[in-house]
Image (spheres, rainbow, N blue to C red):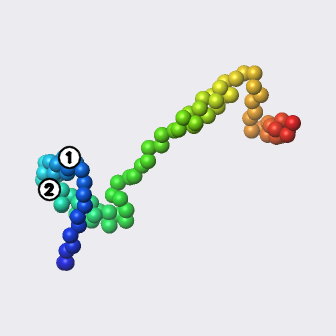
Amino acid sequence: MMTANLQTKIDENQKKKADDLFKRLGTSTNEAIRIFIAKALEVGGFPFDLQIEEVPTEETLQAFREADEIALDINRQHYNASDKEKFFEDLRS
């Protein structure tokens, strides 16, 4: 098997923590990287779920507050699915 070098730069503190972690797991950071790549190739992607934490903007939070106010306003006309004709009639007026 031919080998190739892989070189990357990471934060020094992260490198030290990774070295300590993988040493406690009985391996090295280099071996952990090889394991990661092998698993990624096996599964055809990242070997773990990637998620983006959605943080609502102030505009979105304001829209939520307004929606709550509308929903709780007993003086406002409310519609349900059977009122669709009335809803569209009111929109046109």
Question: How far apart are the alpha carbons under marks 1 and 2?
Answer: 19 Å
In the rendering, which numbered label is found on residue 53? none
The residue beneath circle 2 is 27
Q: Quadrant of the C terminus?
A: top right
Quadrant showing the N terminus: bottom left
Q: Quadrant of residue 29?
A: bottom left
Placement of 34 over or under 4, stated as above or below: above
Q: Position of residue 50 (x, y in %)?
A: 39, 52
**Residue 22 point in image, percent of width and height:** 17, 52
The answer to whether residue 6 shows anywhere in this view is yes
Q: Which three-letter amino acid code belongs to the residue tagged 2?
A: Thr
Q: Residue at x 15, y 56 (%)?
A: 28
The answer to whether one can see residue 86 in this image is no
Indicate which label's residue lies in the foreground, 1 or 2: 1
Residue type, numbered disc 1:
Asn
Q: Residue furthest bottom?
A: 2
Q: Which badge, 1 or 2, comes first in the chain's sequence?
A: 1
Element carrying mark 2: loop
| Circle 1 Cα neighbour tier, 10 Å, few/some/many (<14 / 14–19 / ≥20) | few
Q: Residue at x 32, y 67 (%)?
A: 41
Residue 40 on image: x %, y %: 32, 63
Q: Which residue occupies 59% across, 32% down?
A: 62
Q: Judge from the rendering whether residue 55 lies leftward or rightward of residue 42; answer left or right.
A: right
Residue of label 1? 13
Residue 73 in the image: state x and y as whole percent.
70, 23
Horizontal side of 75 relative to 46 (left or right) equals: right
Residue 31 falls in which quadrant of the image? Answer: bottom left
